[in-house]
Amino acid sequence: MRRFRIARQRPSRPSIPSRHTLSVWRADFTASLVVFLVAVPLCVGVAVASGVPAELGLVTGIVGGLLTGLLPGSSLQVSGPAAGLTVLVYEAVQEYGLRALGALVLLAGVLQLAMGALRLGRWFRAISVAVVQGMLAGIGLVLIAGQLYALVDARAPGNGPANLAGLPDLAANTAGSGTALSALAVGAGTIVLLVLWPKWQRAARVLPAPLVAVALATVVVFVLDLPVARVEVEGLLEVVQPPGGADFAGLMEAEALAGALGTVLAFALIASAESLFSAAAVDRLHDGPKTDYDKELMAQGAGNTVCGLLGALPMTAVIVRSSANVFAGARTKASRVLHGVWLLVFAAAFPAALGVVPLAALAGVLVHAGGKLIPVKQWRPLWREHRGEAVVLAATAVAIVATNMFEGVLLGLLMAVAKSAWETSHVHLEIVGLDEPATTRDGAGPRRPIRVRALGNATFLRLPKLLDQLEALPKDREVELDLTGLRHLDHACAAALGAWEEQRRGPDGTARKEAPSVAP
């Protein structure tokens, strides 16, 4: 008789988090605080510039953290109100009213969801590195130019060119104002601490530099009672106004329908483009999981749908917050979700707690963040080794400063495509027999024809040079043109070579080819 022993199960011990898990949570926790400090001035500033209450910007930031932050797509980029839509939002509010803004944002969010379901987001993966770096540089310049005004408690004139043009007057006004100099001292001190703190590596591992800099600036302003501006936020519930049927009906009226549809389309396309361009840039800043573009597009659409239901600003993924999240050491999406929690807690439950934070200190954080987006160290080697890429980078950055992010990136993409087309459009002619003697060896008979073989890709970009070489051939010699070595021959080149063939053949017939005729 066989006996079976049944092993007795030992009581399971409670699992203890590993050191790796604790370090990840600590990194995400501290990064979330940094992103929160960066998000506050952006949310408030974008809302004010858009002509809506500041609290609506915070509502969008909260949705971007708590909802979009939880959804799959990108793990480290952070969403919220963005400066790229400021002008469109301002014009929409002026045209249709504040209550209609929620309806427009809601429709744009639904359109984004449809685009994501159709898998259109993956097309944004084909982005030139030079365009992405140029986008980062342009945003950094725009951010610095705008935050220099906030650094001295002044109001920025408006867009990028206006902000740059107003800097001389800003310097003159600051020199004659004690209040502005106090704010400048706070902001400049914040920037200095941001630069020096990471050099103390042991302390920087525990507390990130932006958190220390803003906390110290807040203490100094409070103790010395300096006359500098602080963050001003009231309750959130009063400003949340969901759109009603009347708001949608107003947009459907004949005189408003075309403009409303254009605004919805602009919101959806610009928000999608900025978010996915930002995702491409963020993916190059870290070594973690990369973005699923279709899922990220749907996450942005879900966020904008909820923002529309709350009557808030439209949402995009913001490169400034996202880069701050990466540089602060975030490991998972928990950091961006927690940043939404801090926005909700401080803005909804304790709005007075934000009233002690000086705006100049937050502006210093943004100026420092903008400076890190400009690829100063990479510019010189890029110019030496890949001059065309450097030109695309610089043009994209300048275009963003001069116009806006969407138009600047679009120009950069067009330049990148044109550069690639130019570089791949190589065609050259192998000419044999041009130096033949006047007669054959026995002194009788005509010379052999000049053999011209075309190799490469014949496109309209190289057509002038190609025709110059053909027309420089001797007029009294027979020419044999061989096009079998061409990998590509576009219509413009085919038509031009056909015309050259007909003209060269003429009444005496001095041109012939082995390949089929290219005459159209």
Image (spheres, helix red, strand yellow):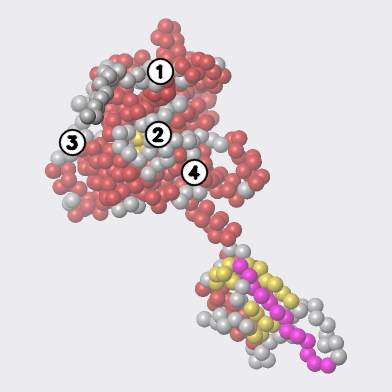
Distance CA(mark 4)–CA(mark 1): 32 Å
Region of the chain picked out in magenta, as a range: 443-456
Mark 4 or mark 2, whichever is nearer to me: 2
Ranked by sequence position, the earlier of labels 3 and 2 is 2
Amino acid on which disc 4 is placed:
Val
Residue 402: image x %, image y %? 48, 43
| SS state under label 4 | helix
Please identify the quadrant where the N terminus is shown. Answer: top left
Residue occupying image coordinates x 31% and y 48%: 116
Q: Where is mark 4, residue-wise? A: 132
Distance CA(mark 4)–CA(mark 3): 36 Å
Distance CA(mark 1)–CA(mark 2): 27 Å
Does 318 lie within the magenta span? no
> Are there few (<14), some (14-19), or many (20+) residues within 10 Å of tag 2?
many
Residue 103: image x %, image y %? 21, 42
The circle on residue 76 is 2
Distance CA(mark 3)–CA(mark 2): 30 Å
Give the residue furthest to the top: 223
